[in-house]
Image (spheres, helix red, strand yellow):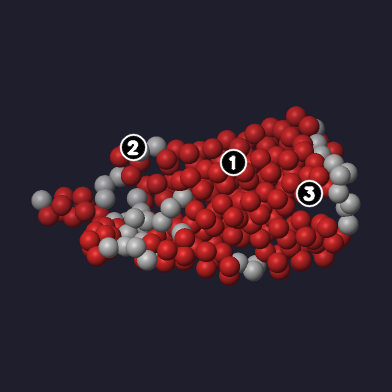
Amino acid sequence: MAIVYLCGQAFGMFVFPFGMLYDWFGPRVVVAVGSIISALGHLLFALAFAGHIDVSVTNCSIFYGLMCWGCYALDVAVLPAVLGHMPRDRGQPTGVLETFSGLGTSFFACLFRGFFNNNFENLMWFMFAVTVVVGVVGTWYMEDAPYMVNRWQQRTITPREQLRKYLIRNRYMSQLVPQRRYSFMTVILVLLNFYLTIQAVVVAYLPEKMTPGKLRGIAIGSIIIVVLILILMVPLHIIDGPTEQDKQVIEAA
């Protein structure tokens, strides 16, 4: 396991090509390529656990390397794309994104105990499906902020379009992250962190008391906490609160 893990992590860290792709074509191409690579790794693992591919250290290292490479590629694409939409508050979104992605392993481990009954083949098919769905959605919706120009666009952009993007950039540089939404996201992540930590300790030290029903209930609880994040997508002004511009106008009045 140590060899498989180290090989996968070392190979996955080679993300320089994806950085070049991002500079040239933006996040969509990187998300698509990264999703395909990661999905391929999960697919090969599923076939290996099903007995169609020989399970050896070499094969597992290659499969895990593909999984890691694709996942790190998604990290390369998503982080700068999101920060481009919030150029004045880069620290807070970075912390939120990295914390959320870091909790992913514990979250899926919780789902594995609750729903898959130590069936690694079904887990890999599930992860394959999740990767494909996330990849399709990310490729369709993920894009840079409208004021950013990649190298491919620089070949054909007109002076009028450059001026338009510059004016849009000024607007982006004058707005801040809604603190209420950020605070709500922080509370969810802290809750999820404590929940996953406590359930892992309980399951590890009290295995004789963990029935399939209890494990399934723990997994459902983690899903509910993660789904709460969707509230942030609701376009309600009450969640945003007053902007900095609103506060300045109120103070001046």
Q: Do callouts 1 and 3 mark residues in contact (Cβ within 8 Å)?
A: no
Q: Look at 71% across and 68% down and name the residue there.
A: 10
Residue 47 shows in the view? yes
Q: Name the disc covering residue 236, or none.
A: 2
Callout in the foreground (2, 3): 3
Spatial CA distance of label 1 from label 3 is 18 Å
Spatial CA distance of label 2 from label 3 is 43 Å
Check disc 3 and report its element: helix, strand or loop: helix
Q: Name the disc covering residue 233, or none.
A: none
| Amino acid carrying mark 3 in the image | Phe
Q: Look at 32% across and 62% down and name the residue there.
A: 157
Check disc 2 and report its element: helix, strand or loop: loop
Q: Name the disc covering residue 45, or none.
A: 3
Residue at image mark 1: 133
Residue 87 shows in the view? no
- 42 vs 34, left or right, is right
Q: Position of residue 192 (x, y in %)?
A: 58, 46
| Amino acid carrying mark 1 in the image | Val
